[in-house]
Image (cartoon, grey):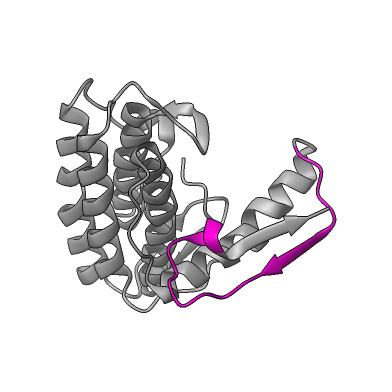
Amino acid sequence: MSSTSTASVAPVAEPVAHIRRETDRFAQVAARSPLDVHVPAYPAFTVETLSAHIGRVLRLFQGILAGHRVTVDQLPQAPAGGSVIEWVCDAVEPLIKLIERVDPDQLVPFPHGAGDRPARLARLAGASLAVEIGVHRWDVELVLGDHVSTPPDLAVSEIETVFTNFVPRLASSGVAPIGGTVNLHATWNLIGPAALLAGEE
């Protein structure tokens, strides 16, 4: 399931370009990483299972923009082993074709209980997906410690997602204490949301 909200994430300038680039980078890093290693930022995920997650999210958005009420349980299972990397890449172009050609007046079922909304908002959905992939691209890069820069507009959307999605969900769930002060430090080299967020209790 995607961990971003299409209703709240600020649109990035070129979601299609971001989706292509972030997925390609994710796949490159995952292919060079041991598949059974746990991802430091998400210990419940291994490189293989995080790759499967990305492939399923891409297919979830494809189903949504095609007008289907797709649930996570209805998505195909990812292949095991190294084949999962190619499976991730195979989902990109069919999704992008839908984003680019969908009838702007067609109602499509948006995720996270957002209801049926005009497909003209598909680019907003694309921006949300770009954030999802971009965050997990950063996560998988932690395995090898090999990070590349995050485009500024995507980094801004990733930061906004923290405040509009993750923080409210954590606060309401009681999983983690929410409080204190968060300081944002802008840098010339925007390498990822973790580089811009510093919290103090």
Residue 133 located within the stretch drawn in magenta: no
Which residues make up the magenta segment?
176-195
Label tally: 0
Residue 180 located within the stretch drawn in magenta: yes
Asked if residue 18 lies left or right of residue 136, the reply is: left
In percent of width and height, residue 158 lies at: 51, 63
What residue is drawn where x is 34% and y is 42%? Answer: 54
Main secondary-structure element of the magenta-colored stretch:
loop
Dividing the picture into quarters, in which one does residue 29 lie? top left
Camera-side residue: 70 or 198?
198
Asked if residue 104 lies left or right of residue 42, the reply is: left
Camera-side residue: 18 or 119?
18
Asked if residue 87 lies left or right of residue 157, the reply is: left
Camera-side residue: 127 or 197?
197
Asked if residue 42 lies left or right of residue 80, the reply is: right
In percent of width and height, residue 39 lies at: 44, 33
Dividing the picture into quarters, in which one does residue 38 lie? top left
Q: Is residue 186 above or below residue 9?
A: below
Res 153 visible: yes
What residue is drawn where x is 34% and y is 31%? Answer: 47
In percent of width and height, residue 99 lies at: 26, 65
Camera-side residue: 129 or 48?
48
What residue is drawn where x is 51% and y is 34%? Answer: 42
Res 8 visible: no
In percent of width and height, residue 63 lies at: 31, 48
